[in-house]
Image: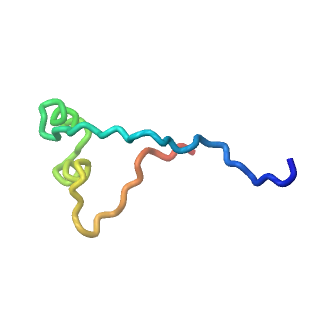
């Protein structure tokens, strides 16, 4: 239709309240077991938990499938 701008294909912004994420204990037994399987060393462990050292390269989340 002439006179109308382009509209993106996407969902509109939700106007409701954002749900607050529950506090997660990263030292719980379940979290430690998960970390045991995914981390290869102490540096991996800290990086996966969000404690990065200065100058650490930024990692990409997910794998590239080409």
Residue 5 % position (x, y): 76, 54
As drawn, which residue projects farthest toward the top?
30
Q: Is residue 59 left or right of residue 66?
A: left
Q: Nearer the viewer, residue 42 or 22?
A: 22
Which is more toward the observer, 39 or 4? 4
Residue 23 x, y percent position in the rendering: 21, 39
Q: In this view, does 32 lie above or below 50?
A: above
User: Position of 56 compared to 5: left or right?
Assistant: left
From the viewer's perspective, is residue 58 above or below residue 45?
below
Quadrant of the image occupied by residue 19: top left
- Which quarter of the figure has residue 30? top left
Left or right, 54 with reference to 63: left
Q: Which residue lies furthest to the bottom in this view?
A: 55
The image quarter in which residue 33 lies: top left
Q: How many marks?
A: 0
In the depicted view, which residue is nearer to us: 40 or 32? Answer: 32
Q: Where is residue 48 in the image (x, y as percent from the top left)?
A: 26, 48
> Which quadrant of the rendered structure holds the C terminus?
top right
Identify the residue at image location x=26%, y=39%: 38
Query: What is the x, y in percent for residue 59?
Result: 37, 56
């Amino acid at each position: 239709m002439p006179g109308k701008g382009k509209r993106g294909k996407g969902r509109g912004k939700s106007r409701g309240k954002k749900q607050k994420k529950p506090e997660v204990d990263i030292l719980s037994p379940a979290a430690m077991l998960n970390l045991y399987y995914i981390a290869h060393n102490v540096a991996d462990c800290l990086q996966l938990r969000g404690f990065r050292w200065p100058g650490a390269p930024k990692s990409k989340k997910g794998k590239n499938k080409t």
